[in-house]
Amino acid sequence: MNGGFRLNWPTGLKRTATRVRWFQRFSQLKAGLDLQQVADALGEPYATVYRWADTFGYPFPDRRRRGRVSTTQWDSVEWGSRDAVIARELGISRERVRQVRASRGMGPSEHRASVQQFEQFVAAESQRLHGLPVAQIIQAYGSQISPQIARRIARAAGIRAHDPESRWRSVDWRLTNRDLAIVWGTSAKYIANVRARLGVGPSQWDARSTRNITEPTYVSALAQERERANALGKRPAAKAKSEHLAKPQPVASHAR
């Protein structure tokens, strides 16, 4: 079972029930396994396995005794890499890398730093992120981050999950019902109902005014709303409706 390997009881070591039990377990192992392999095979913590392997003289490639990382090696480490990558390159544990990173004041890896920045963004912008799809949250963040990580952080921060009605929460309700209806490909009456349901108040601009087109704030708000709709694959139902956006016309009272 152990390939002819024979483990001998250490001279002078007193026998106890616990020691005998551990000795028997190690006696069943093949020689030359590293400590992580031994820990996996026995289903025990790494530190516990190290203690008993050292006690019984089990022949393992102990990196803590024969593979110490020199100061020169630490000096040449690319600290922007993740701890797991550095640990693999140096043949040590991630915990050891974390300890040295902290002792040298090197700060988090680029990956960890980006995660922390996203966590800060979510915490600061939580109110406007509720109900948004993960893709939109990442777009609002403005930098790259894994959707899986973004979703986990958002949920941990209590951000409500996306639902079909959530797009209306981010709509610029300063715009008129007619403008929003054309941008989102629906009716002004439906927009009016959504406005009332959300309690966002009336529009800032008068749908009957012809001066809107010359007001920079209005033009900018309308352009940004179009971009949001385009990002979600929404298009005006017809060219004639799009032309209405550029030239306000008198409408019924419910369009406001």
Image (spheres, rainbow, N blue to C red):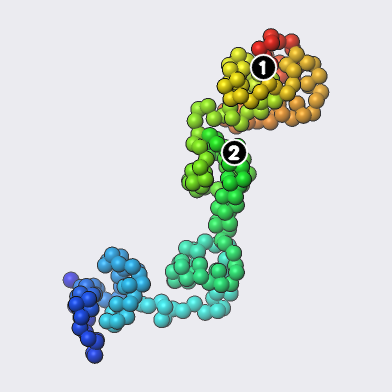
Q: Which mark is residue 52?
A: none
State the residue in front, 83 or 180: 180
* 213 shown above or below 130: above
Give me the residue at 74% from left, 21% from top.
Answer: 205
Q: Check the image and name the residue furthest to the bottom.
A: 12
Task: State the mark number for residue 178.
Answer: 1
Determine whether 36 is above or below 112 in the image: below
- Kind of element beneath mark 2: helix
Q: Which residue is mark 2?
A: 127
Q: Amino acid at mark 2?
A: Gln
Q: Secondary structure at mark 1?
A: helix
Question: Which class describes the residues within 10 Å of circle 1: few (<14), some (14-19), or many (20+)?
Answer: many
143, 46: nearer the viewer? 46
Q: Name which of mark 1 and mark 2 comes first in the sequence.
A: 2
Q: Amino acid at mark 1?
A: Arg
- Residue plotted at (58% across, 46% down): 123
